[in-house]
Amino acid sequence: MGDIDTYFGWGELIGGISPYAWAFIGTGLAIGLSVLGAAWGIFITGSSLVGAAIKAPRIRSKNLISVIFCAQAGARRAA
């Protein structure tokens, strides 16, 4: 029980974290936020296309499919 470290403040606690752990946290956040942003963009684009299709029925869902595939291709190239 005597091997437990005692931290006296937030700075000491954060300073005690391994730099490799910070790298893994940063990488995880970057990938996670990238996926979240892509999902949000597809959602916004899809909802606007569906709204346009309701207002003008000549717009079909094939436009939505092409936009999703283009977003996926762009995300793959960025990664």
Image (cartoon, rainbow, N blue to C red):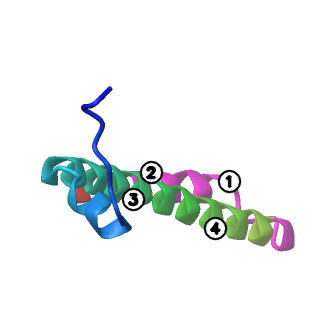
Label 1, residues with CA under 10 Å away: few <14, some 14-19, many ≥20:
few
Question: Looking at the image, which residue sits at the far front?
Answer: 2
- Viewer-nearest of discs 3 and 2: 3
The segment highlighted magenta reads 54-76
Q: In this view, does 59 lie to the left or right of 69?
A: right
Amino acid carrying mark 3 in the image? Ser
Counting residues from the start of the chain, the first of labels 3 and 2 encountered is 3
Q: In this view, does 35 lie to the left or right of 62?
A: left
Residue at position x 33%, y 26% from top?
Answer: 1
Question: Circle 4 sits on which residue?
Answer: 44
Counting residues from the start of the chain, the first of labels 4 and 1 encountered is 4
In space, the residues marked 4 and 1 are separated at their CA atoms by 15 Å
Counting residues from the start of the chain, the first of labels 4 and 2 encountered is 4
* Residue 68 visible from this viewpoint: yes
Q: Main secondary structure of the magenta part?
A: helix
Counting residues from the start of the chain, the first of labels 3 and 4 encountered is 3
In space, the residues marked 3 and 1 are separated at their CA atoms by 26 Å
Label 3, residues with CA under 10 Å away: few <14, some 14-19, many ≥20:
some
- Viewer-nearest of discs 4 and 1: 4
* Residue 76 visible from this viewpoint: no
Question: Circle 3 sits on which residue?
Answer: 34
